[in-house]
Amino acid sequence: MEVDRVIPYHPCLHPLAHHTVPRLHLPVAPKCNTRCGYCEREIAPHATSVVAPGLSGTLLSPSQALAKTREFLHRWGESAVVGIAGPGEPLANETTFNTLRLISREYPEITLCVCTNGLALPERCEELQDLGVRHLTITINGFDPLVVAQIQPIVNKDGRVYEGKRAAEVLFENQSAGLAIAVEVGMVVKVNCVVVPEINGNHVLSTARKVKDLGAHVFNPIPLIPRGLFRDMNEPDACYMAHLRSLCSSIMPVFHQCKQCRADAEGIPGKEKVR
Ligand code: SF4
Ligand code: SF4
Ligand code: SF4
């Protein structure tokens, strides 16, 4: 990856930091405002060896998350990263904001980050910034409504349910607006794009171009983990992903190391303790 000066030493953004900087994911956000075909949200205390986003061994309340954060920072030091990545959509859960508030009050200097589908980002971005979030990951699977509707066919925005092509349009209109606001307020933004070869495989490059134009700093194409409604679909192989990442690298910095960690991951990515 071409490491631009703007890319901070953060495990989700910088290739070297990924192997050295520990991160804690606080599973405080169970609800979601969309329905992705590949999603299988699960609180599974015994599924200790399964690695997938949307999966967590437990759910924490904001005060339990603060206690967990204290323990984690005591062990790893305050240069570790604390983030919220599910198991649902962080911005669709007030517990996310309550947790960030508690943590930023006690640890105003630590690095806080959030992963989001971007649907509620336009109205919540400045609040995230006020709470000390400076790094954001947004998952954007494309900008063609007929393509995105096959991956995310339902969204719920401001109490209204949208389906099909309109759902996809509402989703990427909000993702685009939210991404632009995040960049404007000074956040460093990585965009994840879940690669489902049969659906959006031919749209990943155009997605990279568009998010670059919107100001994203890093692009992270990640292979489909066949779960949920997409459990019978093909996972792109390493060769397919390497080729795609290399093509995207000519457009903007690409992250190559992501292993798509769990909503309750903790430690150095790839070297987590076995739960
Ligand atoms: Fe932060 Fe999201 Fe990366 Fe976790 S996956 S460290 S929450 S940006
Ligand atoms: Fe699942 Fe995240 Fe999609 Fe919601 S946005 S359905 S939690 S993958
Ligand atoms: Fe971020 Fe992916 Fe690394 Fe997890 S595995 S810390 S989601 S880059």
Image (cartoon, rainbow, N blue to C red):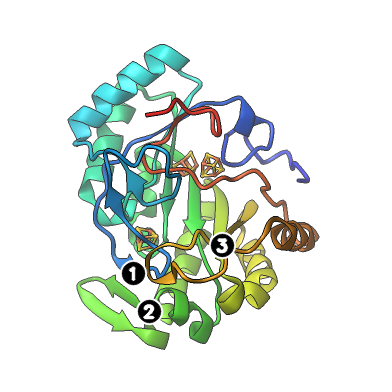
Some atom of ligand 2 lies within 8 Å of the CB belonging to the residue at label 1: yes
Q: Is residue 77 visible?
A: no
Distance between the Cα atoms at labels 2 and 3?
A: 16 Å
Which label sits on residue 92?
none
Give whichever of 69, 118 is nearer the camera: 69
- Residue 204, image quadrant: bottom right
Distance between the Cα atoms at labels 1 and 3?
A: 16 Å
Q: Residues within 10 Å of mark 2 (few under 14, many from 20)?
A: many
What amino acid is found at the position of numbered circle 1 in the picture? Arg
Q: Residues within 10 Å of mark 3 (few under 14, many from 20)?
A: many
Q: Quadrant of the C terminus?
A: top left
Q: Residues within 10 Å of mark 1 (few under 14, many from 20)?
A: some
Residue 218 versus residue 229 in the image, above or below:
above
Instruction: Name the residue that disc number 2 marks.
Output: 153
Could you tell me residue 182's position as x and y percent? 49, 53
Element at label 3: strand
The residue sitting at 74% across, 56% down in the picture is: 242
Q: Decide: marks 2, 1 in contact (CB < 8 A)?
A: yes
Left or right of 68 in this view: 240: right
Could you tell me residue 84's position as x and y percent? 37, 42
Distance between the Cα atoms at labels 2 and 1?
A: 7 Å
Residue 64 versus residue 213 in the image, above or below:
above
Mark nearer the N terminus (2 vs 1):
1
Mark nearer the N terminus (1 vs 3):
1
Q: Is residue 172 visible?
A: yes
The residue sitting at 39% across, 68% down in the picture is: 36
What amino acid is found at the position of numbered circle 3 in the picture? Cys
Give whichever of 57, 161 is nearer the camera: 57
Which label sits on residue 193?
3
Instruction: Name the residue that disc number 1 marks.
Output: 35
Give whichever of 116, 123 is nearer the camera: 116
What amino acid is found at the position of numbered circle 2 in the picture? Pro
